[in-house]
Amino acid sequence: MSIQEFLIPLLAASVIAGTPILYAALGELITERAGIINLGVEGIMLIGAVSGFMMAVTTGSPWLGLLASMLAGGAVALIHAFLTITLRANQVVSGLALTIFGTGLSGYLGKAYIGIPVEKPFGVIPLGPLADIPYIGPIFFQHDALVYISYVLVVIIWYFMFHTRPGLNLRALGENPAAMDALGLNVFYLRYIYVMAGGALGGIGGAYLSLAYAPSWLENMTAGRGWIAVALVIFALWNPWRALMGAYLFGGIDALGFRLQVLGYQISPFFLQMLPYLFTVIILVFVVARQKGRLTAPGALGLSYDREER
Amino acid sequence: MNRLTFKLEKRLTPSPVMVFIIPLISVLLALLLGGIFLVLTGENPLTVYSLMLVDSLGSKYGLTETMVKAIPLMLTSLGVSLAFKMKLWNIGAEGQLYMGAMAATWLPLTFPTLPVYLMLPGMIILGMIAGGLWALLTAIPRAIWKVNEIITTLMLNYVAILWVDFLVYGPWRDPEGSNFPITASFAEAARLPGLGDSRVHTGLFFALALAVILAIVFKYSRWGYSINVIGSSERAARYAGMNIKRNILLVMFLSGAISGLAGMAEVSGIIGKLQHGISPGYGYTAIIVAWLSKLNPLAILIVSVLFGALQVGGYAVQVEGVPAAVATMLQGAILFFVLGGEVLTNYRLKLVSQKGEELSK
């Protein structure tokens, strides 16, 4: 089998399968850079997926669907922000609650939308001359608009984080909130902003599934991708470029399983479905073990900030 | 301008009144929020809630079904609470339950003629070992390299469920099961006896016994004390010479073993075979039950019954066309309110003017 027939379509599929994880991971990345762990990504993605789908079905516009998923994702992230930033609740448990709540809420809202097709999902738009570049074109530039937006987003987030003043502040927010406070920055306000922005990105990740990847709504259709995104942030060492590479790697595992099945390999589909989860565990252990506990996690990650204890 | 803001003031000791009232108020507020939500989506909350209540607690059948659901919740909640005590976030109870059920099933499938006094203890031991080992897989990298156990335990849930699916759709499928994804039914010797003629089974006593044992261990034993110390301050524990790594491995193994026992009790006490989808997410609900119970083993028993009722109620409203997911949503909402409410046990909420705060600085 030639490269054209197997490898190129596989890599192109990796990009598509990796995109929802990439959006969610970028959202979690900026949330964690601000010092807050949000384990509700899975729930946020589900809510993004269902609200985006409902809006797109009702209005016929995938873009309005996208907007709805961002707003919904940001809104549920606000619950997490309030509980963990203002009320200083345990971030792990609050995130778990958000995942459970999101699973229930999306299942409840989406019940009437199961099996309904969406009229206009995000379709493939070959990106002008870029799409004609041999190898590169089909892999990266023959996708839907959301894939292209994600490329731009990675650049923006990277530039913002490492080359702008507010980006420096974002990184400091997760390292040493007390110092930021002393400099006169409003730690609470900024953390709210980043947690909600992260939620909005998680919402897009969900909408990508229901409006582009497999245009439909199914209960629990994220199938653990939100959790993979959380793992990916650690794998990425909180760097957006590494998140991009990681997302495509995971997307590749996902796509590979599917392709092997289509090619008629005698591997049980159950084992192929296990691959992304097993891969996540193995990669996580490998990456963390290699860092030998000197993981470059934001220093104040997971800790509530209490002005009076500074 | 004199802006008013809320300020949290730390209480010197947690308010004892709040400890009991908060969970109650949380449940009520969650129901209220759920009610508003039901109204918004065009349902009558009173109808939905009364249906949930009547079907789960209003009849002998409902009550026994509630207990049937409460048993796996009790066991998995006891399992995760043990790990939570040490701040080990084992959220893999679901997968550990599946692995326990799988290993317990192996015995009657392979040796269907074993006498009951070998069969049941064998299934219990196998179920517990399998659940324990499944948890240990994540405990080892956690102990050595501090690999985040939240993610690894959760990922392994998917793997365990797919593994059981593989078995019941493949090698373990009952040839006479007309292609359903189920194993052959267990022999009578592999069934936990029921209580009276109800579906409630003797697995209930596993949960009761374990809760008492854990309560005693936490309160009176040296080991229970050291787990508490490690949970509240790892550094203090290290200075006191406690072996943290060994305890991580031990606690995770035991935590998984208890959830494995839940799986064994489910296949042996209720279903009588292994099949696709043996748990509607007990392992996840267990997280909420454990937290709501403040990791108190005896409180877990009671809260599990309430959540069992919620589960049964969820199924009941489904008949009326309301999605069963409403129960999951309520569970999440309850946990939100409990978390928010916990602040009030440790802090006092005060309304202060921003200006005043500036002045006092």
Image (spheres, rainbow, N blue to C red):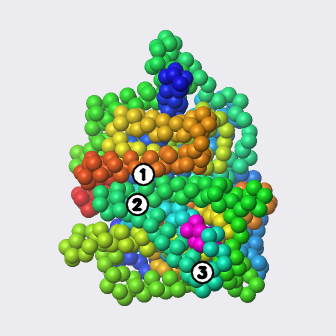
The chain containing the residue under callout 2 comes to B
Q: In percent of the image, x 35 and y 86: which residue is there? A: B221
Dot 3 amino acid type: Leu
In the depicted structure, whether residue B173 falls above or below residue A251: below
Q: Quadrant of residue B63?
A: bottom right
Q: Is residue B117 magenta?
A: no
Check contact, mark 3 vs mark 2: CB within 8 A.
no
C-alpha span from label 2 to label 1: 9 Å
State which region is magenta.
B101-108
In the depicted structure, whether residue B334 falls above or below residue A269: below
In the depicted structure, whether residue A129 falls above or below residue B193: above
Check contact, mark 2 vs mark 1: CB within 8 A.
yes
Q: Can see residue B198? A: yes
Whether residue A159 sits left or right of residue B62 in the image: it is: left
Q: Which mark is residue B190?
A: none
Identify the residue under disc 2.
Answer: B138
C-alpha span from label 3 to label 2: 28 Å
Which quarter shows the C terminus of chain A?
Answer: bottom left
Within-10-Å neighbours for mark 2: few <14, some 14–19, many 20+: many
Q: In percent of the image, x 72 and y 43: which residue is there? A: A113
Q: Which mark is residue A281?
A: 1
Do circles 3 and 1 both sit on a common chain? no
Identify the residue under disc 3.
Answer: B120
Prevailing secondary structure of the magenta residues: helix
Dot 2 amino acid type: Thr
The chain containing the residue under callout 1 comes to A
Eye-nearest disc, 3 or 2: 3
Q: In percent of the image, x 50 and y 16: which residue is there? A: A131
| Element under disc 1 | helix
